[in-house]
Image: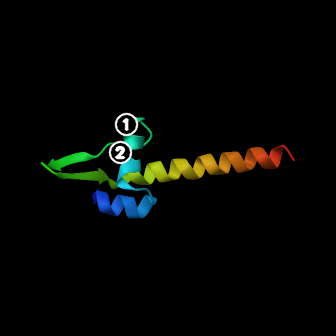
Amino acid sequence: MLLTQTEVTRVVGLSRQELWRRRQRGQFPHPVKLGVRRIGYLKSEIEAWIAGRVSERDAISQHKEHNR
């Protein structure tokens, strides 16, 4: 399933410009070109990216708890 760029910005809470910057740095999934001026993102890749952010957060929390 594909998500539009508008849907992705709403779901992840980042602007279009920030998504572009993160894609350029390899920190966000690249979209699929749907037409001349239209892109879509694979829902599974966006969900995996979100899960990765949650895992990072949890790892940091565990590290902080361990060092107390």
Evaluate whether residue 11 shows in this view: yes
Q: Estimate how packed mark 2 is, as few (under 14), some (14 to 19) or many (20 or more) residues with alpha carbons within 10 Å.
A: some
Q: Which residue is mark 2?
A: 20
Q: How is the image coloured?
A: rainbow
Q: Secondary structure at mark 1?
A: helix
Identity of the residue drawn at 41% across and 49% down: 18
Farthest residue to the front: give it.
17
Residue 45 vs residue 33, the one in the foreground: 33
Horizontal side, residue 67 vs residue 26: left or right: right
Three-letter residue code for mark 1? Gln
Residue 18 vs residue 43, the one in the foreground: 18
| Residue 23: percent from left, percent from top | 38, 41
In the picture shown, does residue 47 fall above or below 30? below
Evaluate whether residue 45 shows in this view: no
Quarter where residue 7 is shown: bottom left
Mark number displayed over residue 39: none
Three-letter residue code for mark 2? Trp
Horizontal side, residue 27 vs residue 62: left or right: left
Quarter where residue 22 is shown: top left
Identity of the residue drawn at 40% across and 42% down: 21
| Residue 12: percent from left, percent from top | 44, 58
Q: Quadrant of the N terminus?
A: bottom left
In the picture shown, does residue 27 fall above or below 19? above
| Residue 31: percent from left, percent from top | 28, 46
Farthest residue to the left: give it.
36
Q: Which residue is mark 1?
A: 24
> Is there a contact, CB below 8 Å, between mark 1 and mark 2?
yes
Q: Secondary structure at mark 2?
A: helix
